[in-house]
Image (cartoon, rainbow, N blue to C red):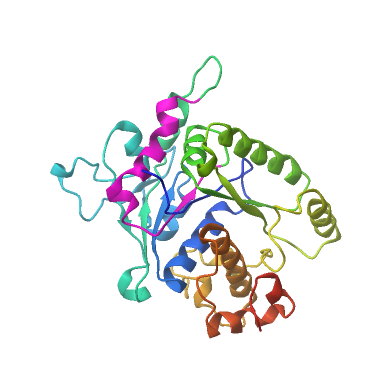
């Protein structure tokens, strides 16, 4: 089956660049603002997305992880799935059960976010076991597994967009996500190693496209500056990157500043839970809105409507509206 539902992977081979926060922000945008059915897939053994949207059980007798996935509320032995279901299970030929997140059709007035949870142990096992010890190549069956899963009619037709949160290593999960995705967002911090990481990602996308048919090429949604500070060093790096990667770089005002409002949303008990529930004049909300508008235009080929509230949120940018194709 040809994939026409967007599968957006947030990827960078460098850690700490905000992949989970950016993936989660997209999930909140498409569900809370656009009223879409979102499937959020956690492919990182750290399980930050799972912790934020579903929660985990913290335990004292596991020195490796310190937590485990919650028991699925709808678990039944005849389903062929584990009671602590995770996306890792499909690599073992098992079923996977989506968990309901805190964003439901009822509390969002139409949208929802379901989560295919990560697993702190099984994902690590997969990344270690399904790679050739001789040449480091990923097992071809494992590489194809996510794509095969998303191609299943009952999976493909259940959601309007799939969002993949990936780990920082170029491992089995990374390769499988890259092979399954229709679009890639590459977040980075404007620091020393940014260009190196970006070059690695562009090369990975190019290699992936060698094996794809012309009509199914993996598309780069863009290079997203994150944790940007008002420093001479950051400005210089962004200027250099603008010259080197002008066609790929997210335009200002889509850049995300180093603001406490972004990581604060990830903490348990914080209200409001979403950046899109912050005051309409909040800078973090405005930046997140601009970022998500740009991404949706890239993956759907157009904006999905500019409401009065969106315009009011973006008014903080003034001249930046034209960049996003929004009239004042």
Q: Is residue 151 a member of the stretch shown in magenta?
A: yes
* Residue located farthest toward the front when viewing the structure as drawn: 214
Q: Foreground residue, 259 or 133?
A: 133
Q: Quadrant of residue 208?
A: top right
Q: Is residue 305 a member of the stretch shown in magenta?
A: no
Q: Residue at x 43, y 24 (%)?
A: 129
Residue 96 in the figure: left or right of residue 2 = left
Q: Foreground residue, 88 or 212?
A: 212
Q: Foreground residue, 146 or 24?
A: 146
Q: Residue at x 50, y 71 (%)?
A: 304
Q: Residue at x 70, y 70 (%)?
A: 323
* Residue 107 in the image: above or below residue 141: below
Image quarter (top left, top right, bottom left or bottom right) of the C terminus? bottom right
The spot of residue 303 in percent (x, y) is 54, 69
Number of numbered markers: 0
The spot of residue 216 in percent (x, y) is 50, 43
The spot of residue 220 in percent (x, y) is 61, 49
* Residue located farthest toward the top when viewing the structure as drawn: 134
* Residue 258 in the image: above or below residue 166: below
* Residue 114 in the image: above or below residue 166: below
Residue 146 in the figure: left or right of residue 200 = left
Residue 310 in the figure: left or right of residue 50 = right
Q: Quadrant of residue 108?
A: bottom left
* Residue 238 in the image: above or below residue 216: below
Q: Residue at x 34, y 50 (%)?
A: 156
**Region in magenta:** 138-167
Q: Foreground residue, 186 or 217?
A: 217
């Amino acid at each position: 089956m040809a994939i026409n539902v967007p599968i957006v992977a947030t990827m960078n081979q460098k850690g700490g660049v905000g992949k989970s926060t950016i993936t989660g922000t997209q999930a909140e945008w498409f569900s809370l603002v656009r009223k879409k059915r979102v499937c959020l897939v956690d492919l990182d053994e750290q399980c930050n997305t799972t912790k934020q949207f579903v929660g985990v059980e913290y335990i004292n007798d596991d020195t490796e992880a310190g937590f485990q996935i919650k028991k699925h509320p709808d678990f039944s032995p005849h389903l062929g799935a584990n009671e602590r279901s995770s996306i890792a299970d499909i690599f073992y030929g098992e079923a996977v059960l989506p968990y309901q997140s805190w964003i439901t059709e009822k509390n969002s007035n139409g949208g929802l976010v379901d989560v295919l949870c990560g697993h702190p142990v099984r994902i690590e096992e997969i990344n270690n076991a399904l790679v050739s010890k001789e040449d480091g190549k990923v097992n071809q069956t494992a590489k194809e597994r996510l794509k095969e899963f998303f191609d299943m009619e009952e999976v493909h037709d259940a959601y309007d967009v799939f969002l993949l949160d990936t780990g920082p290593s170029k491992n089995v999960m990374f390769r499988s996500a890259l092979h399954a995705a229709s679009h890639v967002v590459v977040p980075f911090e404007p620091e020393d190693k940014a260009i190196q990481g970006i070059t690695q990602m562009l090369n990975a996308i190019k290699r992936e496209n060698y094996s794809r048919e012309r009509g199914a090429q993996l598309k780069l949604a863009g290079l997203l500056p994150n944790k940007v500070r008002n420093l001479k060093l950051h400005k210089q790096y962004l200027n250099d990157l603008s010259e080197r990667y002008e066609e790929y770089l997210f335009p200002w005002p889509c850049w995300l500043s180093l603001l406490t409002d972004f990581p604060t949303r990830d903490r348990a008990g914080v209200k409001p839970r979403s950046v899109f529930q912050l005051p309409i004049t909040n800078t973090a909300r405005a930046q997140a809105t601009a970022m998500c508008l740009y991404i949706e235009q890239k993956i759907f080929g157009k904006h999905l409507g500019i409401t009065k509230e969106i315009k009011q949120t973006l008014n903080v940018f003034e001249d930046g509206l034209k960049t996003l194709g929004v009239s004042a």
